[in-house]
Amino acid sequence: MLKRNYFPWVIYCYLFACITAFQSFAAESGDPWKSQSVNPNSFEGTDTERIIQAIEMAKTSTQMVRIPMENTNGTKIWMIDSALLLPSNMTLILDNCTLQLSDTSRDNLFRSDNVGAGITDPDWNENIRIYGIGNAVLKGAVNPRATGDGARTLSLNPQVEQEKGNWRVSYGSDAGKPGLKQTGDWRNIMVLIGYVRDFSLKNVRFENAHGWTVSFERTVGIDISDVTIFNQEFVTVDGQQLMTANKDGINLRQGCKNVRIDNISGLTGDDFIALSNLDTAPDKPKQNGDINGSMVTASRWYGPEDDIEQVVITNISCENRYRAIAIRGSDRAGIHHVFISGVIFRAREDRYEALLIGGRGYGEESLPGKIHTIQAMNIMGNGQSLVRIQAKVANCHFLNGMYTGLNERATLYEIDSAETSNVTENAWLKVR
């Protein structure tokens, strides 16, 4: 009689069950964001209201919000009507999703919740993180109500105004509407962070901000990496290209320290990265929370705590009509210990340079030595030069530069070089 051997079949079933259980466990443990985060699709209301509710719940639970690609309203876009305010100890996961400012919004897309209009004495926030997974996109409005900085007057046709000699203009659908503010301000910045300790931003694509893309004020401990920025000088509304002013990439303002910026690429309508410690109106009072300014905190240097320092910038590839990295200080404001390595700059129209150090036309001229210890290496670019020096800087060193522009030298001085201190160049060359 033929006896059946069931042992191999038992082993097969056992192994199949183990593998299935392991795959299930791996799937759950491999995506901790889903099990450990709050999903705005769990709430009712507009897209903005649901994300705000998710943040509020996460504050007292997981401290993590995950915004998925799929929106329960049937779309794959989350429309934002007002700023999403970020509290301390909050991680926001952008999981292959697109967030876009609506045409009714006149606000930031993200802002730390400790700063804003009328907040004159902000507390410090800490530990805020925005992480993208896959294709995470933050976009400006199709037809923005306002664009540009605080010095720009809104216009429905900025090009016509500029032809008349009115240069300080920028597009906005609010232009000419009674009772509505007719100038830009800090609300046009897409991501605005102030008075924060420890902030991270990773793996996000930005498209068409209404002003500066990301701006930090008095923020200590900044880590930005793997970011793409597409922020041109115009917006297309009903098929017409309309000028939008001051479309920087990443801005560091007063008091930013211990900063790491790595692997950033893209196209901007103004400086790609700007370090700005400026007081353009030293005779006027400044305060936090002023809706009429380009900064949400006071645009004034109050002491060494407002110096910009210990900044590391690496692996930058960018294109614009302005600069790759602009370092501007006025009067006694300090900018120092800035280390730059790996910049590829493609200048449009050969107007400016890869690096600017100094800055004129923004208040009192920078005092001697207040901008110091700037070290840049492995820089490639065309434009007017690799570096333009406009201030009496000290201890600045430039190594391994390849300049392919029209001028004869890779460095341009707009002051007497004898008024600088310890500025060196090594293998900093014009390529013939």
Image (cartoon, rainbow, N blue to C red):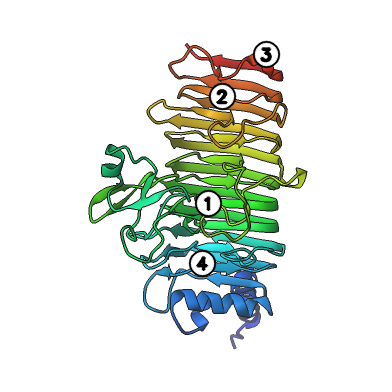
Q: Is 164 above or below relative to 213?
A: above
Amino acid bearing label 1: Ser
**Element type at marker 3?**
helix
Q: Nearer the viewer, mark 3 or mark 2?
A: 3
Name which of mark 2 and mark 1 comes first in the sequence: 1
* Circle 4 Cα neighbour tier, 10 Å, few/some/many (<14 / 14–19 / ≥20): many
Amino acid bearing label 3: Ala
* Circle number at residue 294: 1
- Residue at 56% over, 20% down: 414
Name which of mark 4 and mark 3 comes first in the sequence: 4
Q: CA distance from mark 3 to mark 2?
A: 17 Å
Name which of mark 3 and mark 2 comes first in the sequence: 2
Q: CA distance from mark 4 to mark 3?
A: 49 Å
Q: Can you give x and y, in whole percent of width and height, for residue 417 in the image?
A: 64, 15
The residue that label 2 is drawn on is 387
| Residue located farthest toward the front when viewing the structure as drawn | 283
* Circle 1 Cα neighbour tier, 10 Å, few/some/many (<14 / 14–19 / ≥20): many
Q: CA distance from mark 4 to mark 1?
A: 16 Å
* Circle number at residue 418: 3
Q: CA distance from mark 4 to mark 2?
A: 37 Å
Name which of mark 4 and mark 1 comes first in the sequence: 4
* Circle 3 Cα neighbour tier, 10 Å, few/some/many (<14 / 14–19 / ≥20): few
